[in-house]
Amino acid sequence: MKAIGKIKEEFSKATPQEGRALCDDYRQDPRAGVQRLIASWQKKEAALEKERTRIFAMTEYERKYEHVGALGGIDEVGRGPLAGPVVACAVVLPKGCQILYVNDSKKLSAKKREELAQIIQQEALAVGIGMASPQRIDEINILQATYEAMREALQKLPQKPQLLLNDAVTIPGIELPQVPIIHGDAMSISIAAASIVAKVTRDKLMDDYEEKYPGYDFASNKGYGTAAHIAALKTLGPTPIHRKSFIGNFL
């Protein structure tokens, strides 16, 4: 009788089809350890199948417009914080791309976002990042600065898409056809992928600012107006990365 450790190794290396065959092969094995291995594999496979179904649903717009050619997804992060830039990301994913666990960046842990950002940048045909500084936000307002960051992200794409999927907005000043999608970062894998890369990029900037401007807890709050951040702002005053047009009520 084959050792349970060997059977466990077989399951760990099995493809979905091979795993189902192993379940059939060992279903009559009387050992409780083997039956637990079968149950564990089936539970994991059921969870994976559920995730595959969710991701397929997130490619609805990509499948709808794939006849147009390469599709871009774009999103931004950082419209609400008191400090730091607004960051936009545009991505062009290959046709049929279905990266598991991609989702609205706000629904993912920091660790999962970082893992997925690496996968996205490896698999994407093109990635572009754009930013608008706190000074630019103060100069032209957050909405216009967001559009500016988005246009920069598109300009930095080494491969231009034929159509752009947006998270709810229509970006002025670009000729590219656009499809605004309400809750797009939860509805489109391209927009969700852009949101993840944008979030990871901005979070890393805020982590760096923690070292440059200690006392504001930027690594934790990412520039948002937490109680600790506001207290530090009142005590220490604003830094060069604070948005003057956002902090008047606190000073």
Image (cartoon, rainbow, N blue to C red):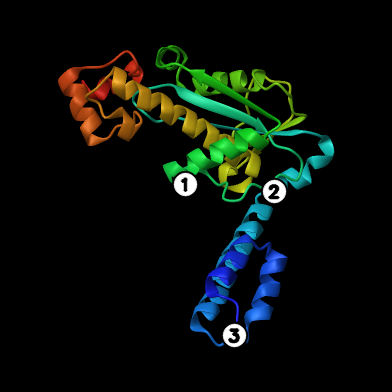
Above/below status of 72 relative to 212 = below
Residue drawn 34% across the image and 21% down it: 209
Residue contact at pointers 1 and 3, CB within 8 angstroms = no
120 sits to left or right of 247: right
Q: How many marks?
A: 3
Q: Is residue 195 above or below residue 102?
A: above
Question: Which class describes the residues within 10 Å of circle 3: few (<14), some (14-19), or many (20+)?
Answer: few
Q: Disc 3 versus disc 2: distance between alpha carbons?
A: 41 Å
> Mark 3: which secondary structure?
loop
> Which residue occupies 22% across, 23% down?
233
In the image, is residue 219 above or below residue 147? below
Residue most extreme to the right: 67
Above or below — where is 104 with respect to 12?
above
Residue 239: x, y in percent? 28, 15
Find out whether the residues at labels 3 and 2 contact each other: C-beta distance under 8 Å.
Answer: no
Amino acid on which disc 2 is placed: Thr
Disc number placed over residue 59 in the picture, else none: 2
Residue 108 x, y percent position in the rendering = 47, 47
Instruction: Tell me, for residue 211, which label it has, or none.
Output: none
Is mark 1 in CB contact (under 8 Å) with mark 2?
Answer: no
First-in-chain label (3 vs 2): 3
Residue holding disc 1: 108
Mark 1 or mark 2, whichever is nearer to me:
1
Q: Amino acid at mark 1?
A: Leu
**Is residue 132 visible to us here?**
yes
Residue at the far left in the pictured view: 235
The residue that disc 3 covers is: 29
The amino acid beneath tag 3 is Asp
Of the two numbered discs 3 and 2 in the rendering, the one whose residue sits closer to the viewer: 3
Left or right position of 54 against 212: right
